[in-house]
């Protein structure tokens, strides 16, 4: 079966737009969490969020005017990340060029909650006001579940499989695993893999109503996302997108592409909503099994993992996640690998979290560092035995095998293993 | 508004909807919407923008008859004249 490598990346995150800026933000532990006046007006308990700050000039230079009229925030983030990824991989993208179809490239770009801003801000209010006639022609293309992948496919002229996956907070990592499997099947040479999540207070309100979002740091937003902390009080909702170009090694080498890392393998499963699992909680056996199956698929052992990018959202599930990792990897506290939570800086971007964090994982592998896991000075009691594995500040680390884990509502799990690409690996 | 003024406004408006396959850069009343490579699904948006721009209401049954820039100009001109009457 073909080996699969990563030859391009793009990201729109709350603390940075663009991969270079994101790498710097990770190294500097830059928070992307800000106070959200609209959440305050609507009297949500949580009034902070990770909302990407996208420059208007970047939008104008990336999207044709006709496209921009029919684009919500989820599509915008997906489009920006995909175009950056495409160019990073060495391909050209011209805003107004619609010539050519790339039959050998597909896209799996997932999302958690499609088009909420389109639905909440326009579709529902205008329809309720009896003004549906004035909605225009571009509503369904914005709220169909496949909007992010369809949008990306049209921008880049992709002629392979173009589809959207949705598995709640496991979406982004699942997209990478599915794209990997597509390439391993030999059907295509390249797959864009990633996910996006739009910014809408209505998406966030539902989670706030569940009392799973942080309410205690509305006046100190940068402290609000506290994965692994004893004072963690829920996740901080966020938005954004991450996209990676997965490519067969043969294709990458034929065209002389720069390689960021290798994808060794991945797995996706469910805990069946049994044995402690529910539609909103993870069955530990399912999560552990997914991690073990990922090791097997990647043909590595638990001992080989030297870095974990956790799901770690800042809820009471964090200590359980650590326990599951320890069991599945068969690692003791004193030999536990590096682990951090990118969400400590950017919040929980729901369906986009997995792909943004895959980009973060590959950057740390490629550049040889582990970023700080912020806001866990007061480590949770059940996690204190791995304190030395949690970087308090960004530090150089020659990690070579990274495990990215994501868990989602529906008791679904997705994990993937990346390998550092170096002179001794080709 | 004179017909020339309407035509200038219509041309500006339609140019925003021209597709990337547009065959003409110099537009006139004889230019067809096909030549502008207007996505047929976007005719709805053109009609809504015309309504906003000129303060008129365009009946849905008029839309399929709009084949050229001149057709659009005539429709708007007619509706504005009807308002005056």
Image: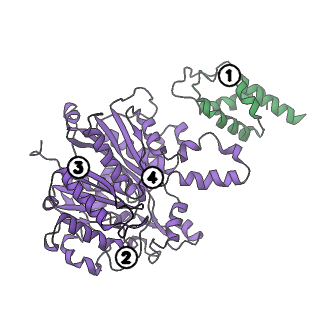
Chain colours: A purple, B green
| Chain at numbered mark 1 | B
Decide: is A16 above or below A6: below
Above-or-below relation of A68 to A242: above
Distance of mark 3 from mark 2, alpha carbons?
32 Å
* Residue A214 in picture, x, y percent from top left: 44, 73
Residue B19 location, x and y as percent? Answer: 54, 28
Task: Identify whether A191 is placed above or below A123.
Answer: above
State which quarter of the image contains the N terminus of chain A: top left
- The residue indicated by pointer 3 is A265
Q: Quadrant of residue B71?
A: top right
Tags 3 and 4 on a common chain? yes
Left/right of residue A382 with respect to residue B62 in the rendered view = left
Q: Which mark is residue A54?
A: 4
Q: Secondary structure at mark 4?
A: loop
What residue does disc 2 label?
A232
* Residue furthest top in the image: B30
Q: Are marks 1 and 2 on the same chain?
A: no
Disc 1 crowd, CA 10 A, few/some/many (<14, 14-19, 20+): some
């Amino acid at each position: 079966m073909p080996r699969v490598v990563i030859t391009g990346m793009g990201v729109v995150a709350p603390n940075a737009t663009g991969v270079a800026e994101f790498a710097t933000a990770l190294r500097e532990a830059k928070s992307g969490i800000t106070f959200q006046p609209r959440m305050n007006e609507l009297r949500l308990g949580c009034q902070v969020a990770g909302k990407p700050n996208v420059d208007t000039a970047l939008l104008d230079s990336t999207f044709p005017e006709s496209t921009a009229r029919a684009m919500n925030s989820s599509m915008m983030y997906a489009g920006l990340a995909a175009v950056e990824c495409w160019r990073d991989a060495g391909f050209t993208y011209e805003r107004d060029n619609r010539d050519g179809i790339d039959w050998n490239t597909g896209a799996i770009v997932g999302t958690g909650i499609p088009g909420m801003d389109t639905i909440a801000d326009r579709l529902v209010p205008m329809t309720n006001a009896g003004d549906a006639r004035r909605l225009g022609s571009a509503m369904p293309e914005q709220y169909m579940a496949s909007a992010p992948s369809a949008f990306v496919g049209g921008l880049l002229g992709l002629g392979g499989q173009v589809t959207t996956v949705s598995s709640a907070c496991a979406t982004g990592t699942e997209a990478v695993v599915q794209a990997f499997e597509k390439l391993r099947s030999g059907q295509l040479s390249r797959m864009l893999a990633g996910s996006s999540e739009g910014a809408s207070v209505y998406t966030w309100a539902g989670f706030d109503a569940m009392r799973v979002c942080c309410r205690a740091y509305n006046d100190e937003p940068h402290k609000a996302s506290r994965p692994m902390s004893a004072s963690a009080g829920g996740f901080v909702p966020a938005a954004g997108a991450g996209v990676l170009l997965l490519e067969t090694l043969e294709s990458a080498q034929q065209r002389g592409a720069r390689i960021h890392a290798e994808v060794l393998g991945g797995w996706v499963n469910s805990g069946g909503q049994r044995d402690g699992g529910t539609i909103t909680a993870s069955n530990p056996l399912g999560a552990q099994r997914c991690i073990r199956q990922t090791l097997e698929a990647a043909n590595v052992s638990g001992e080989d993992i030297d870095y974990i990018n956790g799901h770690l959202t800042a809820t009471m599930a964090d200590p359980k996640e650590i326990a599951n990792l320890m069991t599945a990897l068969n690692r003791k506290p004193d030999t536990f690998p590096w682990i951090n939570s990118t969400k400590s800086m950017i919040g929980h971007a729901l369906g986009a979290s997995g792909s943004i964090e895959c980009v973060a994982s590959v950057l740390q592998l490629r550049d040889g560092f582990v970023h700080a896991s912020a806001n866990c000075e007061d480590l949770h009691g059940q996690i204190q035995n791995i304190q030395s594995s949690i970087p308090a500040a960004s530090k150089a680390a020659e990690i070579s095998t990274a495990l990215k884990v994501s868990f989602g509502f529906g008791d679904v799990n997705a994990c993937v293993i990346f390998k550092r690409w170096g002179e001794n690996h080709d | 508004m004179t017909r020339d003024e309407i035509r200038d406004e219509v041309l500006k408006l339609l140019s925003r909807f021209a597709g990337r396959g547009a065959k003409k850069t110099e537009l006139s009343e004889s230019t067809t919407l096909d030549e502008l490579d207007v996505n047929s699904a976007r005719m709805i948006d053109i009609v809504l923008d015309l309504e906003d721009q000129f303060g008129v209401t365009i009946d849905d049954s008029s839309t399929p008859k709009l084949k050229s820039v001149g057709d659009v100009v005539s429709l708007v001109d007619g509706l504005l004249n009807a308002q005056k009457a």
